[in-house]
Image: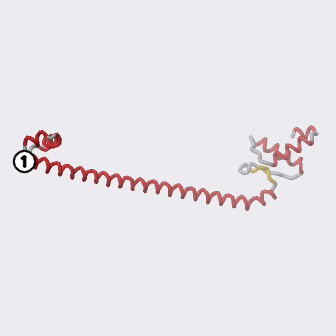
């Protein structure tokens, strides 16, 4: 505005044109000054639209309204799709976690079965050895450990 008052039309015109691009208003007075500057620049009445960060005439705003509504719908749809994608990702993660837990449980059960099978075989071998040769069975490290846990066979 000062450039208009000072008669510096080039500077005033540059300032007015910069206002017509994107403008982030600091306060209500800045907006009022911008509106006054644009009115002096081209004689049109402008309003400031904070969401657009632009000064627009009523005609310009009316022309943009369908585009803005379309953009808003597209943004809402994008946000909805993003939310759905996040929910699907979370569901997939939970499903993979459940499957991993199930596989870990199966692996643990198989390991326990193998350990029981080995202990049964060791038990049979050590008891058979004990009945054939007690000294040999007692001095065998594996059989000794087994007998210490389970006791001697009858």
**Crowdedness near tag 1: few (<14), some (14–19) or many (≥20) residues, C-alpha within 10 Å:** few
Residue at 73% of width from left, 60% of height from top? Answer: 67
**Coordinates of residue 121 in the picture (x, y in percent):** 18, 51
**Coordinates of residue 58 in the picture (x, y in percent):** 80, 56
Q: Is residue 73 above or below residue 28?
A: below
Count of numbered marks? 1
In the rendered image, which quarter contains the N terminus?
Answer: top right
**Would you name the residue on which mark 1 appears?**
132
Q: Nearer the viewer, residue 13 or 46?
A: 13
* Element assignment for label 1: helix
Q: Nearer the viewer, residue 17 or 127?
A: 127
Corner quadrant of residue 5? top right
Please give left or right for residue 25 compared with residue 40 in the image. left
Residue at 10% of width from left, 47% of height from top? Answer: 129
Report the residue that reaches farthest toward the right: 7
Q: Nearer the viewer, residue 92 or 139?
A: 139
Please give left or right for residue 11 compared with residue 128 in the image. right
Q: How is the image coloured?
A: secondary structure
Corner quadrant of residue 78? bottom right
Residue at 10% of width from left, 42% of height from top? Answer: 136
Q: Nearer the viewer, residue 130 or 36?
A: 130
Residue at 89% of width from left, 39% of height from top? Answer: 3
**Coordinates of residue 76 in the picture (x, y in percent):** 62, 58
**Coordinates of residue 140 in the picture (x, y in percent):** 14, 41
């Amino acid at each position: 505005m000062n450039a208009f008052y000072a008669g510096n039309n080039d500077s005033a015109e540059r300032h007015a044109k910069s206002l017509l691009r994107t403008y982030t208003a600091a306060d209500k007075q800045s907006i009022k000054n911008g509106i006054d500057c644009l009115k002096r620049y081209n004689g049109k009445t402008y309003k400031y639209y904070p969401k657009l960060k632009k000064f627009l005439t009523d005609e310009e705003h009316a022309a943009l309204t369908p585009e803005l509504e379309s953009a808003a719908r597209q943004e809402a749809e994008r946000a909805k799709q993003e939310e759905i994608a996040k929910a699907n990702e979370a569901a997939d993660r939970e499903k993979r976690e459940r499957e991993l837990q199930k596989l870990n449980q199966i692996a643990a059960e198989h390991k326990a079965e193998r350990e029981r099978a080995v202990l049964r075989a060791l038990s049979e071998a050590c008891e058979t050895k004990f009945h054939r040769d007690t000294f040999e069975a007692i001095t065998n490290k594996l059989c000794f450990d087994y007998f210490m846990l389970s006791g001697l066979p009858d």
